[in-house]
Image (cartoon, rainbow, N blue to C red):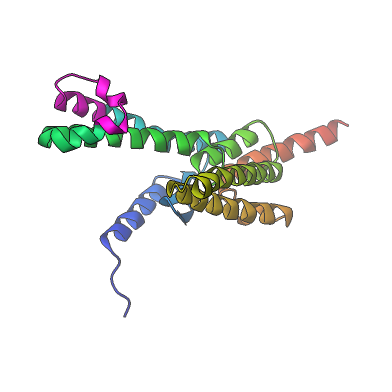
Amino acid sequence: MDPPPSRDKQSTIQLLQNVMEKGGEVGGIILWPLGGFALCGPADGGASADFKVAIAGPLTHIPQMIVWVILYIAFTGGNISGLFSTSSVALYEVSYGGFTGFLSQLCKQTFWMNLHILGFNLFIPAFPLDGGRCLAASLVMCKVRVEKAAMITSVVAFVIAIGMGIWGFIPLIIGDDPNGLFMVFIAGFVLVSSKQLFDLTRAGRVREHPLFSRSCYDEREESSDDVEATEGTLT
């Protein structure tokens, strides 16, 4: 007898069911070093609707950042300058600032964590990051064929993954910085994901990929086919 699903798994299943009940669709669930996420999106509305869904996720960090800034100001008595102070100042506050100093630094570090996740996830156009999903949707919105958009998305992600790997590997070897190991790990996963998309696209099986298998991309392709058929008739 299989063990009952955990509470987190039950919550995820319920969330995905709610998405489908409201007319959305789930292309698949991807697990990677930063956690896991479901490729949820609209069942209609085309690539533009999927672009809005992709960009909405990272933007949820903005209200969280606002909340942490407000709490930081409250704990520091209205002093916001320390929000941009160096790590040595932060260490001093944690060590000698008492419980209030600890809470202010907790708010500060959480603010910066949300900012970094927002920038990393949205502005790096490498699938499976949301930036890569935005790139794919933008290409299709610009009337690029789905197959060509998938190829471009995979190649861009591959190049970025190489750059991320070098960026993490150099300080890891030269500067003995262990933080570089995490970047190398992320680069490896992006590399594998881009290779998978590239292979499926080259084999003519892009519709088997979780990102492009959803019906929101069928609409764009059908529209392109209709335009080509119309042009052929006029000719």
What residue is shown at x 39% (from left), y 48% (from top)?
A: 19
Identify which residue is drawn at 15% across, 25% down.
Answer: 74
| Image position, residue 215 (x, y; %) | 57, 47
Which sits in the foreground, 46 or 63? 63
Name the quarter where the N terminus is drawn. bottom left
In the rendered view, does 150 fall on the left or right side of 103? right
In front here: 160 or 227? 160
The residue lying furthest to the bottom in this view is: 1
Q: Is residue 187 above or below residue 140?
A: below
> In the figure, is residue 231 to the left or right of 129?
right
Quadrant housing residue 143: top right
Image spot of residue 174 (x, y percent): 52, 46
* Residue visible at 45% across and 33% down in the picture: 119
The residue furthest right is 235
The magenta span reads 67-89
Q: Position of residue 150 (x, y in %)?
A: 65, 45
- Locate residue 89, reporting x and y percent: 25, 30
**Residue 108 among magenta residues:** no
Q: Main secondary structure of the magenta part?
A: helix
